[in-house]
Image (cartoon, helix red, strand yellow):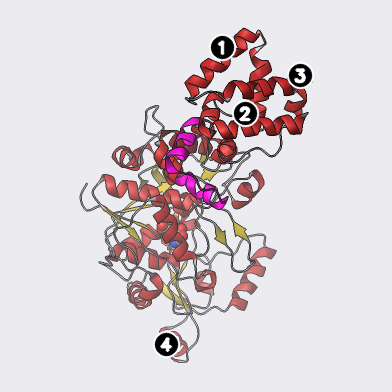
Amino acid sequence: MNNVRVRFAPSPTGPLHIGGVRTALYNYLFAKKHNGTFILRIEDTDQTRYVANAEQYIVNAMEWCGIQFDEAPGKNEKFGPYRQSERKDIYKKYADELIKKGHAYYAFDTAEELDVERNKAEKNKTPFIYNHTTRQNLNNSISLSEEEVAKKITAGDKYVIRFKMYDKCFENEILTAKDLIRNEVSFKLFLLDDKVLFKSDGMPTYHLANIVDDHLMKISHVIRGEEWLPSLPLHLSLYNALDWNIPKFAHLPLILKPVGKGKLSKRDGDKLGFPVFPLEYTNKKDGKTSTGYREEGYLPEAFINMLALLGWNPGTEQEIFTLKELTDEFSLERVNKSGAKFSPEKTNWFNQQYLQAKDNKEVAKLFVKILEEKGIKSNPTYIQTVVGLVKERAVFIKDLWSLSDFFFISPTKHDTKASKKQWKQETGSLMQEVINVLKPIEDFSSENIEIILKEWITTKEIGYGKVMQPLRLSLVGALKGPNLFDIASMIGKETSIKRIENAINILK
Ligand code: GLU
């Protein structure tokens, strides 16, 4: 495929939902697969919904995910600027061209006038639609004479420019279009309304700005969320009216709630306890902070892998993909038509897989940050060995702490239930004997401790558990953790003995 140019075109109205991240990801994968160009365009023409920090949030989120733009605001703006608010002057010309060609018209109707129409229609139990059935009777350049229109415009009357969606003479006309995911989609044009293209505040609407920019930026494929499918007939009609080449379209399926029906929302995340945003976000209006995948400790590679498979399937059983592998495998033909159910459990599973696959040194580097927050300094090799001993039980880096805290700090209390069960009357003196066994050991390696302790237990003819469980309680504070001889060896002879003495004192 030649000259693939795709764009991610978010509106900076708040944090990016994971659905938006997936749209960006699929655009990126498609571009990279075809040696194409991936573009970020900021669609900020709706000033009423504009949120100042949202653009930076989008950029930061993409950076965390490892998805790079080839062209973006401030980067290779070949057909720039790439922020629509900075392109204001470009759009009017095309609205005028559409008027000249008879595909669009001025509409002077005030909000009050339109309300009157709405009320009238409501009384007749029909919705009010500004279209081929009503436009002749409304206040616009179709119903008014040329002189009247000119007079209004010179007088500075406010107007919008509407697209003449459909003319009555084509009754029953159906527009059929090809979507790369859904194949053929058809729309009944006569049911559609005359959408506003240009607003009275001098700004284009999304529809006009979107198709003008896709055209001027030479976008070859429009890959976007399913919620834009209803806009497709308008967009195609606009391309036709302007005599422009039409890009290929692909509308991605929705991401659905884990339970119940419908689109995954922030509320689902709040209710079930998982983030729906890539990064933490604070709403400036109400000061409320929503957590993000980054802050919850997900690895970006795992997050991206999970999103890639949420709506796309490789056609094989393979689930774990690097970004490079995804790029090689991705195709729009393998994107599902129906919605994809989000699964928080599966997301955790991906994180666990990536954490297990990471080498201990790398994991240790991430774990150091958590240790530092807890005020713990330890040497890198020690941390790395600890990671190697406990990593297999961790889903998140942060889990490593509860799995390994006893490698860094002595227990201050001992699990009550376990103590009751394992610490008997005679246990104190038995543990004193264990101290005496440990004391003379010179080579305090795990293997050596194991041989010596086991030998002693055998000659003493006591149950293995009778020694090992209270010993674990003493060293760890609970009946958890990896191999006990490994633990003893790691914390060293002196600390091991101190912890046993401590337990004897506390649990007697
Ligand atoms: N600005 C639109 C959005 O935020 C983009 C739609 C499109 O990609 O055409 O979803």
Left or right of residue 39, residue 411 in this image: right
Q: Does dot 2 land on a helix, a strand or a loop?
A: loop
Mark 1 to mark 3: distance in Å? Answer: 20 Å
Question: Which numbered mark, 1 or 2, is in the foreground of this view?
Answer: 1
The quarter holding residue 256 reads top right
In front of the other: 161 or 375: 375
- The answer to whether residue 495 is above or below residue 212 is above
Instruction: Give whichever of discs 2 and 4 has the lower sequence position.
Output: 4
> Residue at image x 67%, y 60%?
125
Mark 1 to mark 4: distance in Å? Answer: 106 Å
The residue that label 1 is drawn on is 455
Q: Is residue 46 magenta?
A: no
The residue that label 4 is drawn on is 150
Three-letter amino acid code of the residue under disc 3: Glu
Residue 481 in the image: state x and y as whole percent: 58, 29
Mark 2 to mark 4: distance in Å? Answer: 84 Å
The disc placed on residue 480 is 2
* Label 1 Cα crowd, 10 Å radius (few <14 / some 14-19 / many 20+): few
Q: Are marks 1 and 4 in contact (CB under 8 Å)?
A: no
Q: Does dot 3 land on a helix, a strand or a loop?
A: loop
Magenta stretch, overall SS:
helix
Instruction: Give whichever of discs 1 and 4 has the lower sequence position.
Output: 4
- The answer to whether residue 494 is above or below residue 440 is below
Instruction: Give whichever of discs 1 and 3 has the lower sequence position.
Output: 3
The residue that label 3 is drawn on is 426
